[in-house]
Image: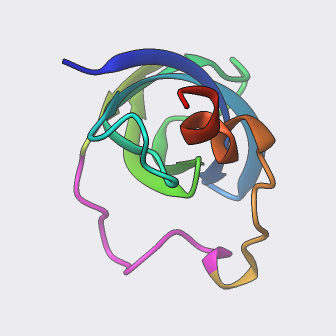
Amino acid sequence: MGTTLIVQGTLRGMGYEVECSLIATRSGSPSAVTPTFSRCAILDAPLWLPDGYYEATFCGQSAFLHRVNRAWSVGVPWRGAAEPPGGENRKPLGNEMCANLGASRA
C-alpha cells in the first residue's frame, strides 16, 4: 500500500500551461531517490480551463487527463499527437518537495 501525498504540478493542454495541485499515491520503495506514483487525481486547478485533453506533470512524472464538464478523467490515451502542443518547450518542475521525498523517509 502506498502513501498518499498532495503535490504541486503543471497542467498543459488546450493552449494553456497552469499550476495545479494533485493528490497522488506513492508506490515502490520508500527509500527510492526518485518517487514513483501509481495513481493521481487533480485536486485543485483553475475552473476556467476548457474541456479537452491535458498532460499533468509532477515529481518528474506525467499523467494524461481529459476534462469534460469540469470533471477530470485520468489515464486516457493521448489523441492525435505523441504529446501535448508545447511539449518541446518543457521546463524542469524544480519541485523540491518531490526531490526530497526519499530523503524524508531516511
Q: Residue at x 56, y 57 (%)?
A: 60
Q: Residue at x 74, y 52 (%)?
A: 16
Is 27 displayed left or right of 44 in the figure?
left
Q: Tell whether position 102 is magenta.
A: no
Question: Which image quadrant for residue 6?
Answer: top right
Residue at the outermost front position? 106
Image coloring type: rainbow
Q: Main secondary structure of the magenta part?
A: loop
Q: Nearer the viewer, residue 17 or 101?
A: 101
Q: Residue at x 52, y 53 (%)?
A: 33
Q: Position of residue 99 (x, y in %)?
A: 67, 47
Q: Position of residue 27 (x, y in %)?
A: 28, 34
The N terminus lies in quadrant: top left
Is 11 displayed left or right of 67 in the figure?
right
Q: In the rendered image of this protein, does residue 68 appear above or below residue 74?
A: above
Residue stretch in magenta: 76-87
Q: Position of residue 44 (x, y in %)?
A: 65, 16
